[in-house]
Image (spheres, rainbow, N blue to C red):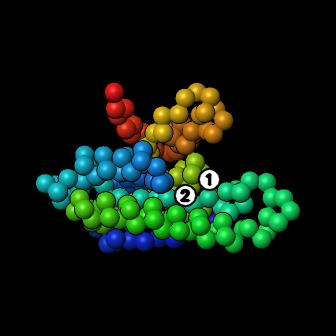
Amino acid sequence: MATTTTPVTPPAVEKPVMVVGIDDSEQSIYALEWILDHFFTPNAPNFLFNLFIVHAKPSPTSAIGLAGPGAADVLPYVEADLKKIAGRVIEKAKEICLSKSVTGVVLEVMEGDARNVLCEAVEKHHASILVVGSHGYGAIKRAVLGSVSDYCAHHAHCSVMIVKKPKIKH
């Protein structure tokens, strides 16, 4: 498993650790912004948590599914695309943190399935809380795709907060 870590600034004192899982979805970005607004306000610069933001980059083979003829030719392109996406996700998270004057954040990209990556990040950083967004899939879609938040709620060895973006009523 490959891991890339990008600290905005190194974490300060020993505090409980909060891990926030992000991807390129609007629900994920909403969850990050919500956490920053509610737990890392500029009025209280002595934050309660050390913050680790983790993005799970799928492996190229899992991204293209079962390999068939010619798959080996495509893998380098898929890997390059996945790296670009991960870079954009981390850059967006960094911009959001800086725009809200939150420093001391560590941004990481870990390769693998998001469910496993987030549970591993909890263990690695001895997190007290894991925060994930909710895509709000229905029962059928959730059964087919699997729910990262549901998996983490059952398997992470810490408290799990699932932040749901409010639905806009028409």
On the rendered structure, is 48 left or right of 114?
left
User: Total of numbered circles in the picture?
Assistant: 2
Q: Position of residue 64 (x, y in %)?
A: 71, 57
Q: Which numbered tag is attached to residue 12?
A: none
Answer above or below: position of 95 versus 148: below
For the residue marked with disc 2, what is the amino acid?
Ala
For the residue marked with disc 1, what is the amino acid?
Asp
Q: Position of residue 83 (x, y in %)?
A: 56, 68
Q: Residue at x 25, y 62 (%)?
A: 99
- Residue that carries the numbered disc 2 in the rendered image: 56
Query: Which quadrant of the figure has residue 95?
Result: bottom left
Q: Position of residue 75 (x, y in %)?
A: 72, 68
Of helix, strand and loop, which one carries label 2? strand
Residue lying furthest front: 170
For marks 1 and 2, the one nearer the N-term is 2
On the rendered structure, is 101 left or right of 18?
left
Disc 1 + disc 2, Cβ < 8 Å:
yes
Q: In the rendered image, which quarter contains the C terminus? A: top left
Q: Mark yes or no: residue 136 visible.
A: yes
- Residue that carries the numbered disc 1 in the rendered image: 113
